Image: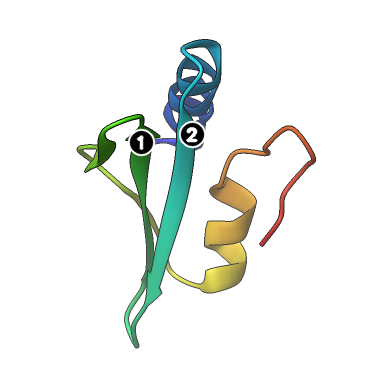
């Protein structure tokens, strides 16, 4: 997933009245983030993920929320 795709995904979730949460994992070789969309009946992990070499690079790729980047 590209940063632009992640931003569009987040905007679509917000427009649908859903919460989109980004979960981050960091290993020795990379940093990854995947989205989970929450709704009235629970959450579902969405396909694809953001991948970067470092946590700093990944943070720059994550879409800004309504109050800016929180991580």
Residue at the farthest top position? 15
Residue 34 in the image: above or below residue 65: below
Residue 62 in the image: x percent, y percent?
A: 56, 46
Q: Secondary structure at mark 1?
A: strand
Nearest the camera: 44 or 39? 39
**First along the sequence among labels 1 and 2:** 2
Compared to residue 6, the image places residue 36 above or below, namely below
Rate crowding at label 2 as few (under 14), some (14 to 19) or many (20 or more) other CA atoms within 10 Å: some
> Would you call the spot at circle 1 few (<14 residues within 10 Å), some (14-19), or many (20 or more)?
some
Say which quadrant the C terminus sits in: bottom right
Q: Report, in whole angstroms, how far the alpha carbon at label 1 lies from the one at label 2.
A: 6 Å
Residue at which label 2 appears: 19
Query: Looking at the rendering, which quadrant does residue 28 occupy?
Result: bottom left
Tell me if I can see residue 31 in this picture.
yes
The residue under the point 20% across, 38% down is: 47
- The answer to whether residue 1 is visible is no
Which residue matches tag 1?
A: 37
Q: Position of residue 4 (x, y in %)?
A: 51, 27
């Amino acid at each position: 997933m590209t940063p632009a795709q992640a931003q569009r995904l987040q905007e679509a979730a917000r427009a649908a009245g859903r919460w989109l949460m980004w979960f981050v994992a960091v290993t020795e070789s990379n940093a990854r983030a995947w989205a989970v969309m929450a709704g009235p009946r629970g959450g579902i992990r969405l396909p694809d993920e953001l991948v970067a070499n470092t946590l700093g690079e990944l943070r720059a790729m994550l879409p800004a929320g309504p109050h800016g980047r929180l991580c």
